[in-house]
Image (cartoon, rainbow, N blue to C red):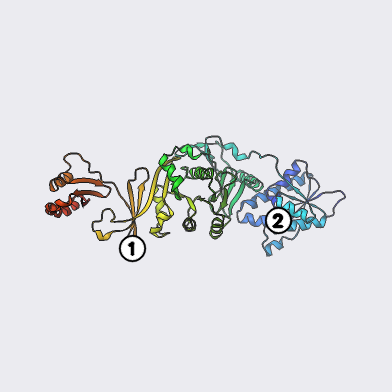
Amino acid sequence: MGIRLAGETVAVPDLTAIVQGIVSKLVGEGRLRGRVVVRKEIIAYLEQAALRDQAVGYAGLEELKRLRELSARGLIRLEYTGDESVYKTRELDESALNMVVRDYAMQVGGIVVTGSRVAKMVAEAMGVDALLYEPENRVHLSFERFFDENTMSVHIKENTQPVAKKGRPGDWSYVRLSDGVLTRREIEQIVNEIVEEARRREDSFIEIDRPGSSIIQLGLYRVVVTRPPMSDGWELTIVRPLKKLRLEDYNLPAKLISRLNERAEGILIAGAPGMGKTTFAQALAEYYFRRGKIVKTVESPRDMVLPEEVTQYSKTYADARELHDILLLSRPDYTVFDEMRTDEDFKLYADLRLAGIGMIGVVHATSPIDAIQRFIGRVELGMIPSLVDTVIFIKNGLVEKVYDVRMTVKLPTGLKEAELSRPVVEVRDFMTDELEYEIYTFGEQTVVVPVKKLKFGRQEGHRLYSQLERLFPGARLEEVEDGVVISIPRDSANKYVKSMRKLRKLMEKYKVNIRVKLE
């Protein structure tokens, strides 16, 4: 333990102060002088985090380098104390490391420097002086110079020129942001700055910090960092929503609005990456909130911009069982499940929907039917209409297609024998009610069959209609989605017996289902 000089301040930073770069900022502002003592347990922690390629490790080590430079300039006296072998024998978490810092500060009569309000309260409860650093105003971060009002995302990789997507979903272009390339060192500095800012801001979260990758939600910005060996170089992708839309901005048909208000409780929002699925889900969640519904979200990362009353849960920090229990007990009217990808995600969606909670799931899909197919194999076929009743497909930021999903028992289109009738999931165009797909089991397989409404046309001279009219003079011919219906008077059925015998050949010839109905 170093000798304390009379009147000298002994500052002991905790882990948050090191990772957030607080000590060097306080020195730069003239608020901190004298001796700064860093515990070796924190250094060992940062080293292990950096070896695991975690962003907090790099950010903390960068701060220690800055402190060494400030010490060399005579602005502070930097010292190290403690036993790093303690960390090597048993892994300490952030709370345990901060307790080591508080105990030491109590022994030497020092002051704890922290960026955590909770850590300050704990120190004061122990009778230890604490200095909490809270920035007065949000600073402009270095990466923000790459963004303007038309920038959707910025893509940076070491030793390449940074580029940006500019425009809007479905109508964008790549724009080179600089003629020079960014080095690994420059990208590391940008990442450290982002981590420091995320650790101190209440509207920011380090959602995932794995060896090789980090995902950070920094206000409106979604930041994805990858590092070697996972990637072949440091890469930084920063995405920002261009604008926040209300559901009214989509100019949806009154029929669809009525469906959302009255019947839709199992909604899938589908679309390709970058087409505006989350933006629409955000607008729909806010719409339900404005209608007096209790709305919650499950996200990773939490990048939706929603009113404070809407609680946003992180899929990263909770397992499926915990989310299941919380959502069932808190009784929301609607839960928005963003970015459903894994079997566990779909199982959680199904469990909550079957419990009576309105669900809005967001899935990647290149076509509307692909969204429904994501459930096949994960749940029983007969459960799909109970889980999903409405599919909304987003393309280029607009609602391109809406499907209605329902269950019926019928003879699937194209099959001829009545005994082959079975439960069939019908997927219909919501606006026209036209049948587009049938999903049913055939043998041991589940098949998804595209059904095209037969368009024979009533034009004069069509061979099928000409032959039917000759065989059934006076009968009424009606085109339906799975073929043709011939309606004949019940009291005249006997005179059409010979004609009925010829129907099978016509069905085989024209590949169409023909039924006779007695009136």
Counting from the top left corner in percent of width and height, residue 462 is at 18, 42
* Crowdedness near tag 2: few (<14), some (14–19) or many (≥20) residues, C-alpha within 10 Å: many
Vertical placement of residue 279 versus 376, above or below: above
The residue sitting at the top extreme is 149
Residue 84 location (% of width, % of height): 72, 60
- Left or right placement of residue 218 versus residue 279 in this view: right
- Left or right relative to 291: residue 73: right
Q: Nearer the viewer, residue 102 or 333?
A: 333
Residue at the (28%, 59%) spot, across then down? 421
Residue at 68% from the left image edge and 62% from the top image edge: 88
- Quadrant for the N terminus, please: bottom right
Please tell me whether mark 2 sits on a helix, a strand or a loop.
helix
Mark 2 lies on residue:
42
- Residue kind at label 1, given as amino acid type: Glu
* Residue 438 picture location, percent across and down: 33, 53
Residue 25, visible in the rendered structure:
yes
For this rendering, which residue is in front, 464 or 264?
264
Residue neighbourhood size for the residue with mark 1, other residues' Cα within 10 Å, grouped as few (<14), some (14–19), many (≥20): few
Q: Secondary structure at mark 1?
A: loop
Q: Which one is in front, 27 or 490?
A: 490
What percent of the width, then of the height, locates residue 397?
46, 40
Whole-angstrom CA distance, mark 1 to mark 2, is 59 Å
Disc 1 + disc 2, Cβ < 8 Å: no
Q: Considering depth in this image, is 202 or 283 the residue closer to the camera? A: 283
Task: Tell me, yes or no, if residue 272 can be seen here.
Answer: no
User: What residue type is disc 2 on?
Assistant: Ile
Q: Which residue is mark 1?
A: 444
Left or right, 456 with respect to 386, comes to left
